[in-house]
Amino acid sequence: MTIKEVSEKYGITQDTLRYYERIGMIPSVKRTSGGIRNYDEEDCSWVELCLCMRGAGLPVEAIIEYVKLFMEGDETVPARLLLLQEQREALVEQQARIQKMMDKLDYKISRYEEAVKTGKPPVWTKNSTECAKKGNVKC
């Protein structure tokens, strides 16, 4: 596949694909005799992995390190495993933080929906003790 086809397939720019390759987020793509990038199934798998990892919020440096270790061969399997486990743990922590924010928003939305329905001001009852300690009655 050409870089244009890969760009269209994954919804990213050709410049982004070139950048990913240049900095090592994906391994070097094979080229035709004329120097044109020729993406095969394996190259597309790397692009997919890169996009998945970036979409999950993994740092560019972690992806580059993973690719580097992969290219060094099977003796780096333990290091790759550790890197992925560390990144997964960071995502689990991020997920927990996001869930707390979602819970807070859901609570506030439910209070405002009730206020709109009844025509009365919102009643703030959840975590009222904790909020009072912080000096914020409408936490």
Image (cartoon, rainbow, N blue to C red):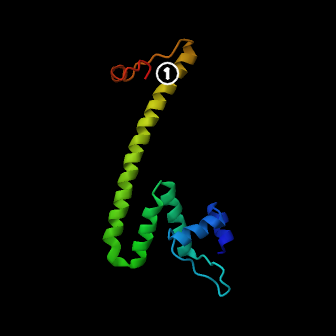
Q: Quadrant of the N terminus?
A: bottom right
Q: Please tell me whether residue 110 is drawn above or below residue 38 in the rendered image.
A: above
Query: Height in image: 26 above or below 91?
Result: below
| Relative vertical location of residue 71 with respect to residue 120 in this rendering, above or below | below
Q: How many labels sit on residues?
A: 1
Disc 1 crowd rating (10 Å Cα; few below 14, some 14-19, many 20+) is: some
Residue depicted at x 41% and y 18%: 137
Residue ranking furthest to the bottom: 33
Viewer-side residue, 120 vs 90: 90
Q: Which residue is mark 1?
A: 111
Amino acid carrying mark 1 in the image: Arg
Query: Would residue 4 be found to the left or right of residue 76 on screen?
Result: right
Q: Which residue appears at 53% of the width and 61% of the height?
A: 51
Q: Is residue 97 above or below residue 55?
A: above
Residue 96, position as x, y percentages in the image: 38, 42
**Residue depicted at x 51% and y 26%:** 109
Question: Split into 4 quadrants, where in the image is the C terminus?
Answer: top left
Q: Residue at x 63, y 61 (%)?
A: 12
Q: Position of residue 35 (x, y in %)?
A: 65, 83
Q: Position of residue 61 (x, y in %)?
A: 44, 63
Could you tell me which secondary element the residue under label 1 belongs to?
helix
The answer, for residue 45, to whether it is visible in the render is no
Residue 97 in the image: x percent, y percent? 40, 41
- Is any part of residue 46 visible from this angle? yes
